[in-house]
């Protein structure tokens, strides 16, 4: 079978969803001053809300690798991206600490399989002599997301409010899901 350039389209999709992944996980930091005032959050509430992501993430990064090996990156990423996108959209419906904590926990759980799936895609789609380049191209999404995430999130929040910001960010992942599935 002759290799085609289509594998780089797949790496492009991986790059895009990893950018979305990192912007989604950091968005709450930009909204926290507004959220803490609106919901009367104290320092402990803020710490628990921000830490909830890490609880879910730590658990699912390990379990997510097992699930990706068993079910494949296509199915796992499809479900994971949909759930984390819905958790971001659900943040817009938050009414207080408990809901913020729960949607952050859900975000962490759903984002956990991202890097195991990314590694699986690279291993499945590229020959050994191209895997390091492909992994580098996909992983550059992390510093790019950290670089552009602040201005994007801040502008979305200023333009559409904190609720609109979370809805728009969630929609990005929701749009990616059928593209991933059908490609």
Image: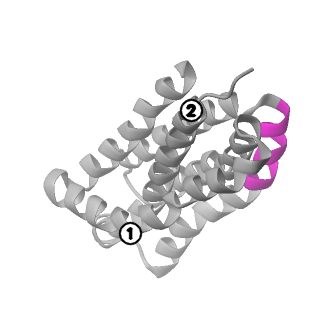
Is residue 62 found inside the magenta-colored segment of the image? yes
Q: Quadrant of the N terminus?
A: top right
- Where does the image place residue 36, in percent across and percent down from the top left? 35, 70
> Between 126 and 22, which is closer to the camera in this rendering?
126
Q: What's the magenta region?
A: 60-70
Q: Residue drawn at (27%, 68%), measured in percent from left and top?
A: 34
For label 1, the SS is: helix
- Where does the image place residue 178, in percent across and percent down from the top left? 48, 23
- Where does the image place residue 168, in percent across and percent down from the top left? 30, 43
Identify the residue position indicated by label 1 in the image.
147
Side of 15 where 156 appears, left or right: left
Colouring chosen for the image of the structure: one colour
Residue 87 seen from this side: no
Identify the residue position indicated by label 2 in the image.
5
Side of 127 where 137 appears, left or right: left
Say if 25 sits above or below 9 in the image: below
Say if 127 sits above or below 26 in the image: above
Tell whether label 1 touches label 2 (CB within 8 Å): no
Q: Residue drawn at (47%, 26%), measured in percent from left and top?
A: 179
Side of 28 where 55 appears, left or right: right
């Amino acid at each position: 079978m002759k290799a085609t350039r289509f594998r780089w389209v797949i790496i492009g999709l991986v790059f895009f969803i990893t950018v979305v992944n990192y912007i989604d996980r950091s968005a709450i930091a930009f909204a926290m001053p507004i959220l803490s005032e609106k919901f009367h959050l104290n320092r402990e509430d803020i710490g628990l809300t921000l830490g909830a992501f890490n609880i879910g993430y730590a658990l699912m990064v390990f379990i997510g690798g097992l699930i990706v090996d068993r079910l494949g990156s296509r199915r796992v990423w499809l479900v994971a991206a949909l759930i984390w996108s819905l958790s971001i959209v659900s943040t817009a419906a938050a009414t207080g600490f408990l809901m913020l904590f729960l949607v952050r926990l859900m975000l962490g759980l759903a984002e956990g399989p991202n890097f195991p799936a990314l590694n699986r895609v690279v291993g499945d789609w590229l020959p050994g002599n191209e895997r390091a380049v492909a992994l580098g191209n996909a992983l550059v999404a992390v510093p790019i997301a950290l670089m552009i995430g602040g201005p994007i999130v801040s502008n979305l929040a200023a333009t559409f409010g904190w609720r609109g910001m979370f809805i728009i960010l969630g929609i990005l992942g929701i749009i990616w899901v059928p593209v991933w599935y059908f490609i």
